Amino acid sequence: MKTLVSADEMRKCDTSAANRIEGGTQTLMGRAGAALYETYLSVLERTGKSKSDAVAVVAGGGGNGGDGYAVAELLAKGGTPCRVFTTTDKKSADGEYYFERARSAGAEFTKVDENTDLRGFGIIFDCIFGVGFHGLPQSYAAVAIDRINESGAFVISADINSGLESDSGEYMSAVRSDITVAVGIYKYGHFLGGARDLIGELTLADIGISPDGACVCAPDEDDFHDIFAKRPHNSHKGTYGTSVIIGGCREYSGAAKLANLSSSALRMGCGISRLCVPESIVNSVSPYLLESTLFPIPDRDGHMVYSPPLFDAALSKASSVALGMGWGQGKDNFKILIHTLGTRSLQVIIDADGLNAVADYGLEIFSFRRNKVTITPHPAEFSRLSGIPVKGVLENPVGCAVEFAKQTGVIVLLKGTGTVVTDGKETYIVNRGSAGMATAGSGDVLSGALAGLMSYCEMTPKTVAAAAYVCGVAGEMASDEVGDIGMTSGDTVKNIALAVKSLSAK
């Protein structure tokens, strides 16, 4: 597991570490500069570049700029021609200290202006903004970011790419790096939003800063061996539970997508998958089902009609249920949802139109809950549930999801390039997946995978994160096979079993 912190938490950790060590923040800045220099040496080995090749350091006015001055000193002392481009005259006290040391060591300094050209440098250090940045880069900092991106050089970003927001991964203009060296602790923004489009490789420099208190985690594939353990031969389909999927309506029959839901549940390892759809679309769905069972639900005008005995039968012997996918706006949806929430010993996943039913009824619908519940909104759906504008959700996805989970008692899986999973106490960010997953039905596949895994696992933030991780890995495998442009959600489904295998204990 990788440990992640917010910008505020990072500042607290920084202060705590500075109070523990001799030299305080000045020592930490020197260590950061040393870590960046070590990265530079490894790049030379990798690329065949020479120490005699000129290097540029582009420095801002805060702590990130100070890290740049610290690495500039080491570059100059090591015999590398080093030119520091400053975007401002402002410097922190520690930055001023390393600025003077770098100048004494022989580094040259130039102020960024409209005529700045960085195309002659083989390696550039991006040290403009750190974790405190928010918004749109202004003035010469904006010029510097553009010049770095136009340079064609090998770019090393200090801590986080300049222009990339530390808590969200959002950006309007930001540096594209070949390597980003996270200083001390990873930040949320390394794994959210547009980070994967900017960061070529992400590494961590240990400079003696440790997290204080609870942290967010980014799981690695080795973290799920306990969930996908080797199965005993002496078992049967009943051992691994029954998952039920309730969805579909006449307007959104999506036969193949509904079948994918059941298929993804089975490929995640459940023993039996039961697909409940309106009677009026049974004939269109049934040709796509092979291993799953079909449970027709009476409907009116193409939408499911609520009947307590019938839904008791639909949920009979089930251990998990996912509902709402392609459900439409049926008048009885909230009744079906309340019935499901009140069924004991059943782990519930609510997606798509199920979330619309929650929003229409109000969050008090969770007062009917007699079981564990996971909701799987994308930012617009989460906005409707929480009342927070989409912009606010995107700017603070972790904080918004955590507060909502605390308020409602459900597990929140907030979808995105980096998916946030939390129950308000334990939080994960999953950043696996491919651009090809931006296609119709990918959310349905995730809901099916969740239903399949929860049929034999206890619903916790970790197991929910495991399902998201599997789908992400499966999406990457699918992208490798067919490419992002022509990829469909069915391609992800086909790779789920292989993704599970890759995460299983060897």
Image (cartoon, rainbow, N blue to C red):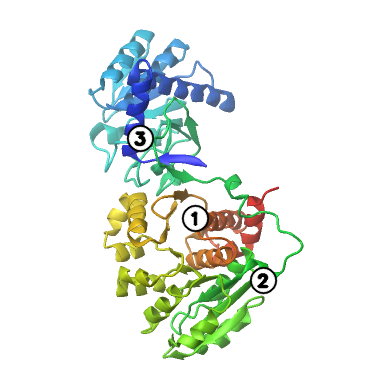
> Disc 2 designates what residue?
238
- Which secondary structure, mark 3? helix
317 versus 489 height, above or below:
below
> Disc 1 designates what residue?
435
Discs 1, 3 touching: Cβ within 8 Å: no
Tell me if mark 1 has few (under 14), some (14-19) or many (20+) residues whose alpha carbon lies within 10 angstroms of its own.
some
- Which secondary structure, mark 1? helix
The amino acid marked with disc number 1 is Ala
For residue 282, what is the image quadrant? bottom right
10 versus 55 height, above or below:
below
Between the residue at mark 1 and the residue at mark 3, the CA separation in whole angstroms equals 30 Å
Tell me if mark 3 has few (under 14), some (14-19) or many (20+) residues whose alpha carbon lies within 10 angstroms of its own.
many
Residue drawn at x 40%, y 43% is 188
For residue 454, what is the image quadrant? bottom right
456 versus 140 height, above or below:
below
Callout in the foreground (2, 1): 2
Return the disc, 1 or 3, that comes first in the chain's sequence. Answer: 3
x, y percent for residue 228: 63, 55
Callout in the foreground (3, 2): 2
Discs 3, 2 touching: Cβ within 8 Å: no
Between the residue at mark 3 and the residue at mark 2, the CA separation in whole angstroms equals 47 Å
> Disc 3 designates what residue?
10
Between the residue at mark 2 and the residue at mark 1, the CA separation in whole angstroms equals 36 Å
x, y percent for residue 406: 35, 56
The amino acid marked with disc number 3 is Met
- View extreme (top): residue: 104
Callout in the foreground (1, 3): 3
Confirm whether residue 276 shows in the render.
yes
